[in-house]
Every structure is written in structure tokens, then in C-alpha cells.
């Protein structure tokens, strides 16, 4: 079966580039459905979805948008219409993937269109700002792919053609090769920070698999938490095991390694049963090139690699975090259980390691117990989060929820 790719762009200003991209997709045996998201100009060639249809999908007209005299507002309206049409086209079975190209305006619109598609549908954005800090984690679809449009701001050239030809092969190849998630077994969404800092997944994964669950572990380095939160909010998980809150503390203290302001809220909004623990919440992760904020420059410093560096929190900051966690969990609409390991919350928080701070941990434990009182059930554990005893307690809670019918039983 031939795959159909939705190609999105401003066909008035980037007609040559889009025509080249379409030609490369069709030259490989793919089909194209072209959507024009221009406002001012008209495309030199026929498109499948006109700019008037896009504006109408957002409850507007092109003439009304032009009359606004404000490019940003007009394009936000076009973004809303394009996203709605993208969703409808996929629901109707008319497209197998999407690709969009643009500068900042086109990328902004493309991000909305990508979020309109479910996970497993190939979604590519060829952008002059791919990989830029301009693109917040909260704008990213969980499985969106970016390709830097080098030399592609205006007009075709050898560099631009290289990017576009690779993009054409990538999106069509993905549409042919993708294995969309089947969700034949209940899925448990888990967070972790690598496998050296937090090790509980090594204990939990085989046990959960044996119980008949698929386990999706998300790396809490910004993009991972963003994908996790979106899926949790959509109710994609039978149960959440959110044991790495590193992105939450990053967001609260201004780090770029953030999953956005909604961290620790997705499962609560969807009513998904959730178990939460404060893994790696004693350290602030910063981008390797990001300057350490002045208030943290006297702290212990740990260079994880060239991409990430870490500094520690003091007791007062950890008390404030306990309040924030309790506040976010208290509004959850589904069953919630907080696990509080009193022996440490990440591997560097062991005796002799750089983040070992028994006074700070004790302050966090006391503050958490007080903040959670009468709001969120707490299980205090006399162990380290990476000890087998932590995983044992988590599995016992899962088994109890299964017995009570709160979490569906796994499937062989």
C-alpha cells in the first residue's frame, strides 16, 4: 500500500522548496497531500488543502486575518486550523505521516500539527531552528523528529536540497516501517534518570513484565518527562511509577533541563493511579553550557558529562520542594501513594559520594511528612531508593491495587 504524507508549509513563499520536497517523496513511490498555510499570498500550483480551508477550520477567514494587520495573531489562528485539519485527516485514514517546514513561524505552526497526531504516526519538522532552546519541551509531541534546515531560509541551493531530500526519505521510510503501539497489555509508565543514578528499574522491570505489564521508562532529562506527562494526561498508562522528579526541581530553579510547568500533574489530571518517589530531587541539573546561577556557585559541583552538570540543594530548598510536591499531588483525581526512602534518593546520595547530605535528607523527610499529612498517603521506607527493598514495597502496593481493582491485572 502506498503511503500518503501530509506536507505542510507556506506555499506562497516556499513554493520551490515544497515542490522539491514533494517531488522527492513522490519519486520514492509515496503519495502527498499538500496543505497550504499561507496568509497573504497564493500558491503558484494547486494544493489539496487551501489556506481558506485552514482558516475556516479555526473559525476565521483569510480576509479577516489579513485585516488584523498582525502577522503573529493571524498565524496562531492558522496554526489552530491546521492542527484541527491534521487531526481530522488522520482520523479519516487519509494520511500516514506528516512533514512540515519553515522558519520560526512555520515551526510554531508545525509543532501544533505534530501534537494533533497520536504517538506512532511519523511526524517530521524541517526547521531553521531545529534543536534550538526557543522550542520549549511543552510544545513537543512525544515522538516528533526534527531536521535542521541548513541554508534553507530562502530559495533552493545544494545545502537546502540535502536537508529536504533526507527529510523526504525519513518521513516516507518511517511511514512504511513504523510499528504503531498496540497496547495489547497494560502499560506502566515509569520515570528514571539513567541507570547509574537511579537503579530501581533494574529490580522492577523484570518483575512487572512477569506480572503481564509492558513497562515504558522515560529518561527525565526534559524531553523524556515531557513525553511522559503528555501520555499520562491522556490516560495512556494503567499505572504510573513516577520515581524521578529531577525535571520538577530543574523547572522550579530555572534550569533549561525542564519538562515544562505541568510536571507531576498529568497522571493526577487523568485519574491514573500513581506511585511517586523523590528520586534525584536533591540535585539541580543544568545544561553543560549553561552558567551556574550565582546562588548555587558555592555548592558541590558534579560534571555528569559535557551535556549535563549538577549542583546540590540545601536543607531549606529541599523543604520548599516538599511543599511543592505535596501541593501538586494533593489535587490528583486518582489514587496516589508517595514513597519516602529515608536512606537516600539517588546513587550519589550514599556515604562517601559527592551528594551525600544526611542533614538535608532528614530535613526533606520531615518536611515531606508534614506537607503530605491528611493530603497524600505516605509510605516511609528505611532504605535507599536504589535498594531492592524499595522495589519490593512498590510491587506490594501494585499487587494491592490490582487486588482492589484499582489497576488492571496484567496479561501474559
Image: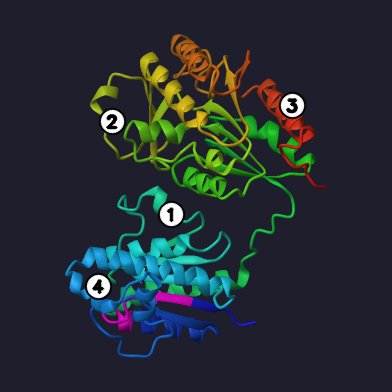
9 magenta-colored? yes
The residue positioned 56% from the left and 69% from the top of the image is 174
Q: Earlier in the sequence, mark 2 or mark 1?
A: 1
The residue positioned 38% from the left and 65% from the top of the image is 80
Dot 4: what SS? Answer: helix
Q: Quadrant of the N terminus?
A: bottom right
Q: Which residue is mark 3?
A: 396
Mark 4 vs mark 3: give the one in front.
Answer: 4
Q: Position of residue 137 (x, y in %)?
A: 40, 48
Q: Which residues are magenta?
A: 6-17
Q: Name the one closer to the observer, 241 or 406.
A: 406
Q: Which residue is mark 1?
A: 140
The residue positioned 54% from the left and 79% from the top of the image is 4
Q: CA distance from mark 2 to mark 3?
A: 41 Å
Q: Which residue is mark 4?
A: 65
Q: Which residue is mark 2?
A: 292
Dot 3: what SS? Answer: helix
Mark 2 vs mark 1: give the one in front.
Answer: 1
22 magenta-colored? no
The residue positioned 61% from the left and 40% from the top of the image is 272
Q: Position of residue 64 (x, y in %)?
A: 24, 74
Q: Earlier in the sequence, mark 3 or mark 1?
A: 1
Q: CA distance from mark 2 to mark 4?
A: 44 Å
> Quick one: label 3, few (<14), some, or many (20+) residues within 10 Å?
few
Q: Name the one closer to the observer, 184 or 14.
A: 184
Mark 2 vs mark 3: give the one in front.
Answer: 3
Relative placement, left or right, of 205 versus 236 is right
Amino acid at each position: 500500500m502506498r503511503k500518503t504524507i501530509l506536507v505542510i508549509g507556506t506555499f506562497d513563499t516556499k513554493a520551490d522548496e515544497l515542490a522539491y520536497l514533494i517531488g522527492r517523496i513522490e519519486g520514492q513511490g509515496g503519495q502527498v497531500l499538500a496543505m497550504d498555510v499561507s496568509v497573504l499570498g497564493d500558491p503558484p500550483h494547486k494544493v489539496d488543502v487551501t489556506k481558506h480551508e485552514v482558516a475556516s477550520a479555526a473559525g476565521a477567514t483569510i480576509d479577516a486575518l489579513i485585516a488584523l494587520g498582525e502577522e503573529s495573531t493571524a498565524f496562531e489562528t492558522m496554526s489552530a486550523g491546521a492542527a484541527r485539519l491534521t487531526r481530522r485527516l488522520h482520523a479519516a485514514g487519509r494520511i500516514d505521516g506528516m512533514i512540515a517546514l519553515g522558519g520560526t513561524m512555520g515551526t510554531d505552526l508545525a509543532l501544533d500539527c505534530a501534537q494533533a497526531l497520536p504517538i506512532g504516526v511519523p511526524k517530521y519538522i524541517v526547521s531553521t531552528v531545529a534543536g534550538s532552546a526557543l522550542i520549549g519541551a511543552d510544545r513537543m509531541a512525544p515522538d516528533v523528529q526534527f531536521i535542521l534546515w541548513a541554508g534553507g531560509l530562502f530559495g533552493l541551493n545544494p545545502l537546502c536540497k540535502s536537508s529536504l531530500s533526507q527529510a523526504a526519505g525519513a518521513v516516507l521510510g518511517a511511514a512504511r516501517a513504523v510499528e504503531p503501539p498496540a497496547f495489547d497489555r497494560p502499560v506502566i509508565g515509569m520515570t528514571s534518570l539513567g541507570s547509574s543514578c537511579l537503579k530501581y528499574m533494574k529490580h522492577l522491570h523484570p518483575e512487572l513484565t512477569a506480572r503481564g505489564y509492558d513497562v515504558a521508562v522515560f529518561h527525565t532529562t526534559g524531553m523524556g518527562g515531557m513525553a511522559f506527562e503528555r501520555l499520562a494526561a491522556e490516560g495512556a498508562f494503567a499505572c504510573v511509577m513516577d520515581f524521578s522528579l529531577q525535571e520538577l526541581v530543574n523547572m522550579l530553579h530555572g534550569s533549561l533541563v525542564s519538562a515544562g510547568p505541568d510536571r507531576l500533574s498529568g497522571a493526577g489530571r487523568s485519574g491514573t493511579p500513581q506511585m511517586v518517589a523523590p528520586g534525584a530531587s536533591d540535585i539541580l541539573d543544568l545544561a553543560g553550557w549553561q552558567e551556574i546561577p550565582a546562588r548555587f556557585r558555592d555548592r558541590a559541583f558534579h560534571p555528569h558529562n559535557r551535556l549535563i552538570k549538577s549542583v546540590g540543594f540545601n536543607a531549606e530548598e529541599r523543604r520548599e520542594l516538599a511543599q511543592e510536591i505535596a501541593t501538586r499531588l494533593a489535587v490528583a483525581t486518582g489514587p496516589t501513594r508517595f514513597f519516602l526512602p529515608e536512606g537516600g534518593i539517588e546513587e550519589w546520595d550514599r556515604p562517601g559520594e559527592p551528594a551525600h547530605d544526611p542533614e538535608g535528607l532528614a530535613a526533606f523527610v520531615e518536611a515531606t511528612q508534614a506537607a503530605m499529612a491528611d493530603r497524600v498517603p505516605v509510605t516511609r521506607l528505611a532504605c535507599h531508593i536504589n535498594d531492592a527493598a524499595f522495589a519490593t514495597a512498590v510491587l506490594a502496593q501494585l499487587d494491592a491495587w490490582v487486588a482492589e481493582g484499582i489497576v488492571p491485572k496484567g496479561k501474559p
